[in-house]
Amino acid sequence: MNYTDRITLHESSGRQYTPETGKTEIVVDEGVTLPCNVSAVSLDKTEAVFGSYKRNVATARLQRPYTGVADKAVIGTQKYNILRHVPHRSESVFYLEGVSEWT
């Protein structure tokens, strides 16, 4: 399996008002960047597991188990909310939902 993509995993620490944008935004830590393999989840599996086929769900597989806490992710410039983290003995799998803004 090729681990050519890079994922940055973040932990959110709450919300904060930003005067420049006039919005309340999610505050995240600096994050950790790791190599991964990203693939899209099929529409059938998305509907069966997550209840709706309209969700933009991707799978990110890491080479090693990830033991930290993360609830947000960035791959390239796309932001994701982490739906599920499945730790295995030799790898970690993250199910990610693509979003335009973190919620």
Image (spheres, rainbow, N blue to C red):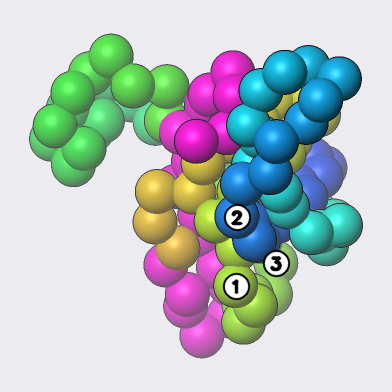
Q: Secondary structure at mark 3?
A: loop
Residue highlighted by disc 1: 69
Q: Is residue 34 visible?
A: no
**Residue 32: percent from the left, percent from the top?**
83, 62
Give the residue type that dot 1 points to. Val
* Label 1 neighbour load within 10 Å: few <14, some 14-19, many 20+: few
Q: Is residue 79 visible?
A: yes
Residues at discs 3 and 1 in contact (Cβ within 8 Å):
no
**Residue 55: percent from the left, percent from the top?**
33, 21
Q: CA distance from mark 2 to mark 1?
A: 14 Å
Residue at point 60%, 55% (across, down): 14
Residue highlighted by disc 2: 14
Q: Is residue 75 above or below residue 67?
A: above
Q: Is residue 92 magenta?
A: yes
Segment colored magenta: 86-103
Considering only order in the chain, which callout, 1 or 2, is on the residue closer to the N terminus? 2
Q: Secondary structure at mark 1?
A: loop
Considering only order in the chain, which callout, 2 or 3, is on the residue closer to the N terminus? 2
Residue at point 81%, 45% (across, down): 6
Observer-side mark, 2 or 1, equals 2
Give the residue type that dot 2 points to. Gly
Q: Is residue 77 magenta?
A: no
Instruction: Pick whichever, 62 or 56, lies toward us.
Output: 56
Considering only order in the chain, which callout, 1 or 3, is on the residue closer to the N terminus? 3
Residue highlighted by disc 3: 63
Q: Is residue 92 above or below residue 100?
A: below
**Residue 58: percent from the left, percent from the top?**
49, 34
Residue at point 14%, 32% (across, down): 51
Q: Secondary structure at mark 2?
A: strand
* Label 3 neighbour load within 10 Å: few <14, some 14-19, many 20+: some
Q: CA distance from mark 3 to mark 2?
A: 29 Å
Q: Is residue 54 above or below residue 59?
A: above
